[in-house]
Amino acid sequence: MKCPVCNYKETKVVDSRVASDEITIRRRRECLKCGFRFSTYEQVELLELMVIKRDGRKESYSREKLAQGLKKAFEKRPIGSESFRILVNKIEKNIQTIKRNEIKSQEIGEMAMKELKKKDPVAYIRFASVYRAFKDLATFQKEINDVFKKKRKNIKKIQKGKNG
């Protein structure tokens, strides 16, 4: 691991611990030349997974591609880099649980939307509008109504629990 400050090739691990997402290992490192300390993250990589696209083509799974789609959904939305990383890890953990060598891109999209819906309804709507290719305004409006109807029900349950 190269030092990000002086590019020296040797660093030592000072501390290792499980990150807050309980999937990733966070390592504190120190450069053996300049003494600079920095963090790295180690996570499972889905190497043997093939994604079946809508047109039937197959391509290797790409974490970067998933993250790119999610970043577009969260554009100008309040999410920190740690929360975003945890979100991507949750989706990947869901992908791992299917225990197959191939997965349809639609399945990944559904898993992403499930996690987005919990995290940020606006980001969810953005992602869903592209992923599901809403044909018209009525379809878009229906999805918005469904999301906020569920939010209102959850708020009422919480309020009822506090008052009752």
Image: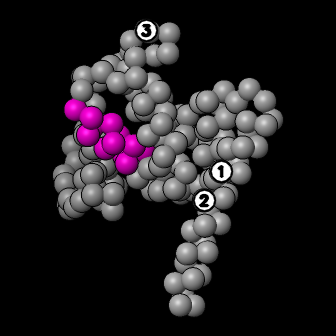
Q: Quadrant of residue 135?
A: top right
Magenta segment includes 125 = no
* Residue in the image at 67% along x and 44% along y: 143
Asked if the residue at tag 1 contacts the one at tag 2, i.e. Cβ–Cβ closer than 8 Å, the answer is yes
Query: Furthest residue to the bottom?
Result: 163
Crowdedness near tag 3: few (<14), some (14–19) or many (≥20) residues, C-alpha within 10 Å:
few
Q: Which numbered disc flags the more N-terminal residue, 3 or 2?
A: 3
Callout 3 touching callout 2 (CB < 8 Å): no
Answer with left or right where residue 45 lies relative to residue 140.
left
Of the residues under marks 3 and 1, which one precedes in the sequence? Answer: 3
C-alpha separation, residue under disc 3 versus residue under disc 1: 33 Å
Left or right of 163 on screen, residue 28:
left
Identify the amino acid type marked 1: Asp
Main secondary-structure element of the magenta-colored stretch: helix
150 or 17: which is nearer to us? 150
- Give the residues drawn in magenta, as a range: 88-99
The answer to whether residue 108 shows anywhere in this view is yes
Front-most of residues 26 and 97 = 97
Mark 2 sits on what residue? 150
Badge 1 is on which residue? 146
| Kind of element beneath mark 3 | loop
Residue under numbered circle 3: 57
Determine whether the residue tagged by mark 1 lies in a helix, strand or loop.
Answer: helix
Residue 31's place in the image compared with 162, above or below, is above
Image quarter (top left, top right, bottom left or bottom right) of the N terminus: top left
Give, as a three-letter code, the residue at label 3: Arg
